[in-house]
Image: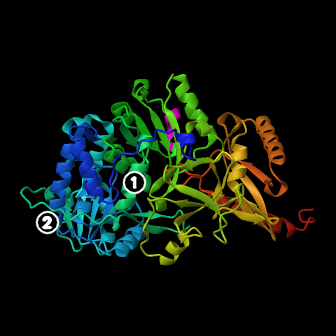
Amino acid sequence: METKWSRHYGADVFTPDINENQSAYEVFRESALKHSDRIALEFGKRKFTYKELLAEIDRYASILAANGVYPGGRVMISCRRMPHQIIAFYAINKIGASVCFVMRNASPEIYQRVGFAVKASHIIFTVEIYERYKEMFRHTPIHQIILAKSTDYALSSDLLNPNMWDLKMHEKYDVEQDKGAPGPQIVLWKDLWKDDLPEVSRPIAPDEPAVYFTSGTAAGSVNIVKISSRSLNAQAKQCAFLMGRNNSRVFSFIRMDFSYGMCFALHTTLLNGHTYLINTQKELEFSAHDINIYKPDIIIGYPQMLTSLIDSGAINGKALKTLKAIYSCGNIMSGIDYYRLREFFDKRHLEPKIVRLYGITETCSVCMYLPQAEVRPSALGIPLPGINMKIVDPDTNSEVSHGQSGVIAINTPAYMLGYAEADDDTATVMRKLHDNKTWILTGDIGVEGDDGIFYYQGTRRRVFDRGGMHIYPQLIEDTIRNIIGVEDCCAVPLEDGDDIKVKVAIKPEHHYLFNNDKLNELKDNIERTCEMEMVAPMCPDEYEFMAYLPTGKYGRVDYEAIIKMFKEENDEQEDLKDDLSDVDPRDGI
């Protein structure tokens, strides 16, 4: 029988036998026993089979428990991508404590806020940035800092890898000089190693917080999201069919301190018997070297990182021969970027799937999947099997009529428990609606099409009123991006007296930049297209060509920075007008 899912996914949706009502450690252990001789992790040349990884997790559960991590406790982790994060997460879960991931290089205020909010007793931190933050740790509840180095698990042959050599050079900080300093105790990860400790087995309850992430998505302000083992396991079960049945080599650009990197890329990979490949870069940059060495079957990343495949001349074509799929998440991949990637692979006679995913931290990352055959501007996709979505009125929370815009609401078994220190925001985002089910109100504006596919129209934070009409900058941007000659753009509202005007920052393709005739033609084409495809209040008032658009984290265009820049330009022009008005035209005669 056809369902709203099967007409897109087919009847044969792979659903593994994962018991959601266990701890994250327990379901990993079952996977490790089932796939014991498969490779679970690769970090450079170092490889862990599932059996070896389970043994290391069990050993560190005993070590960390002997070192003061207790059931019901909290441990912060703030590292680059390293085996330590994975081993520590499952070991801490086995102890009965929970992990709070904090983005590496976060501000001291974020570390302090998170530390106090979760009452963290320990933090696992990266050596090469420790000196920058060591004073800050004295102002947190943390009483032990465990410092991790890449050489703890790297092989000597890995020093032939330029990325690993670079990491080692940055890890030469002399920790010994700080071991006796006031404040939290400092210890190296490798110095914790002990044998013959009693086994610890008090796995955290499946409905207790297992992991914390910071997120500013649904509530519109940065909050600390609580996610249970049950939700982590439900996510891995729902996303299994995306990875496939065969043992795949999975390479993720997304760090584990983000829900996509932990809940989807890591937990789904390990619970389904695949191999997780750890990026050896210090930061989030694209690593052609890792692609060449690992030869992945699946790549997961933000759109801007995935399109960097196109611009890198350092990738060996043979390294992509095994590539089966690319998963784009964390932001919406534009249609142009999709076709650029498709063209890149077509020229090399390769046919990997290019898959766009949608989800937020509050839904444990992925909740929607766009089938490759359904590529359209602003298309998000359809819900994963077992997930329901609808469009609701932002004021009444009632479902709107089909075809009307509203807030995207999601009912999923992989939902958050709530925010750690913001009960009001939890009540706003998690709602029991008229059907008495719990829904997550994402804060994103969308519409459901006649084809059952959901389409993105922007976030509530970017929507504004003009002439009595809701204006969605995303729709303006999608229209302009599809014009030949436009590489990227950003539409923003600006105050104009008692009114609002719309101005668009446009980054043209490079060969347009130094040709005024081509720029004028492009501008005329943009104006004509907007007038034909948009109602009058949506049409932009001004356009400005720019050599680049300011970006924030992970390559996203920083529209707040663009608003500020345009406002400063307007203020300068107003000041110039005032100065000219003060000049007597007879002066100088």
Mark 2, secondary structure of its residue: helix
Q: Decide: marks 2, 1 in contact (CB < 8 A)?
A: no
> Residue 25: in sight, yes or no?
yes
333 with respect to 479 (left or right) = left
Q: From mark 2 to mark 1, how far is it between C-alphas?
A: 28 Å
Taking the spot 40% from the left edge, 24% from the top edge, the residue there is: 318
Q: Which mark is residue 10?
A: none
Mark 1, secondary structure of its residue: helix
Taking the spot 80% from the left edge, 40% from the top edge, the residue there is: 525
Residue 475 in picture, x, y percent from top left: 71, 51
Which residue has dot 2 on it? 66
Which residue has dot 1 on it? 263
Nearer-the-camera pick, 426 or 393: 393
410 with respect to 575 (left or right) = left
Residue 225 in picture, x, y percent from top left: 43, 66
Residue 571 in picture, x, y percent from top left: 74, 65
Which mark lies nearer to you, 2 or 1?
Answer: 1
Q: Which quarter of the rendered picture does the N terminus lie within?
A: top right
Write down the region rendered in magenta: 305-311
Residue at the far left in the pictured view: 196
Taking the spot 78% from the left edge, 65% from the top edge, the residue there is: 574
Taking the spot 31% from the left edge, 61% from the top edge, the residue there is: 77
Type of the residue with mark 2? Ala
In the rendered image, the vertical position of residue 337 relative to residue 184, given as above or below: above
Type of the residue with mark 1? Cys
Report the label total. 2
In the rendered image, the vertical position of residue 319 relative to residue 470, given as above or below: above
Residue 391 in picture, x, y percent from top left: 64, 60
Whether residue 131 appears in magenta in the rendering, the answer is no
Nearer-the-camera pick, 373 or 493: 373
| Crowd class of label 2 (few under 14; some 14 to 19; many from 20; radius 10 Å) | some
Mark nearer the N terminus (2 vs 1): 2
